[in-house]
Amino acid sequence: MPSETNITKFTALLGLLVVAVSTASAAATPDARGVPAPSALRGVFFNPQLPEGHAWLLRYPACRARVQKIVRELSRETPVNMVVVYVNIAYSMKPPAELPGKDQAFVQWANTTYLDNVANFVDDCFDVGIAVELDLASNLWVPWSVQPKHQIGNSPHWPKPDETPWTEAAAWYSGCINYIEDRTKHPENIALWVMTGNHELGEAEPRLWPDESNPALLAGIEETVKHVWPVFRAAGKRPKAPPYMFGIFSNNPYWKERSPEERLAGFTNLKKWIVDDLGLPPDYWVFTAYPNCDPAPDGFYYLRAIMDILGRENASHIIATDLKGPGHEPEYAHTILSVSGQSGVDLLEWHWRKFAAYGIQNWWIWAYQDTDEKTPWAESGLRKIDGIWKTDLIQVIKKESK
């Protein structure tokens, strides 16, 4: 009788074969780099609740066996075929707060032990048929002088940007991509790399819209994008995505006076910078999806406008991210959107109906597991803290994935 281990490996390989076949046969138009879009990436932001905490990848040898068990369970119990994790610049430097020297080799300033952990995680996910999206989070987005009191570089754990942060950012992004792709046994299991991070918050999206009180902020971010994106895009062999975009649905006094077009300025700006100005389209566009925004209560069809900005013909190269189902309800108290009377299942189904209408095939959900953090989305997982699966959510994902 075959062992459970062999059965698991066979199932994983069969799953990857199916994905490969469907990718090869997908009726998707390659982008400028000739990379065809695979069909149906069904992902989840991977936030296992472990004693090692948020920085579990930094301490991966201590929790590797438990994480292997978790991704095996995720593969067995759900149709999820991709997990999303951050690769954090603060963990990848030695020492963390120092910028790489101009003439230093990557291995001289990089914490390669941490990056080896990331490579091992990619391989562990390959073993169970789950691909990995790696979000490279840097805080080197604007010169220090632009907003010195509001930079996470004030922390001793994050590097302090100089006046040309794009130079070090390009070295960091490209160095991490090349190193991890070289170290993993299965670089093909990296679904995509995302260029992300925030000068003030660290692991968050960069600010892609204007700040009337500090115009130098957007100018610095544009400068960084235009310097770094060509280097990021050219590094390694796996698909690339530029920074995350999202519509701003805040209902505070400032945003109440803004037009829908201003709320979507991040989309317009990024598209202009990397496509119109640089002529370097991505393999994927990634943007945060919000329910009940098409139309929104203000009558505007935000998702339709997003598709028009990015191009309807690029629908198969879009990944809708951070799908907000259950547990996100408190977030909407401060937005123009409403989820009143809708369950988590209702909200996920709203997304998928709209995606089908616009031709969007790829998505990932926030998040894998509930947390005990004091956040509005603490109960937004597919799984409770105690490990119990939320069966209503799993069933609706299975239905959508058929």
Image (cartoon, grey):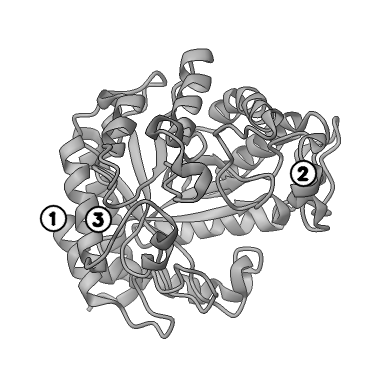
Q: Where is mark 1, residue-wise?
A: 402
Between the C-alphas of marks 1 and 2, the distance is 45 Å
Looking at numbered disc 1 in the image, what kind of residue is underneath it? Answer: Lys
Looking at numbered disc 2 in the image, what kind of residue is underneath it? Answer: Val
Between the C-alphas of marks 3 and 1, the distance is 17 Å
Q: Which mark is residue 107?
A: 2
Q: Nearer the viewer, residue 296 or 119?
A: 296
Q: Specify whether 64 is left or right of 38.
A: right
In this view, 346 is above or below 299: below
- Residue at coordinates 50% horizontally, 50% vertically from top-left? 252
The C terminus, quarter of image:
bottom left
Between disc 3 and disc 1, the foreground one is: 1
Q: Specify whether 135 is left or right of 391.
A: right
Between the C-alphas of marks 2 and 3, the distance is 37 Å
Say which element carries label 2: helix
Q: Where is mark 3, residue-wise?
A: 14
Between disc 2 and disc 3, the foreground one is: 2
Q: Name which of mark 2 and mark 3 comes first in the sequence.
A: 3
- Residue at coordinates 77% horizontally, 53% vertically from top-left? 158
The N terminus, quarter of image:
bottom left
Residue 326: percent from the left, percent from the top? 32, 68
In this view, 260 is above or below 269: below
Q: Name which of mark 3 and mark 1 comes first in the sequence.
A: 3
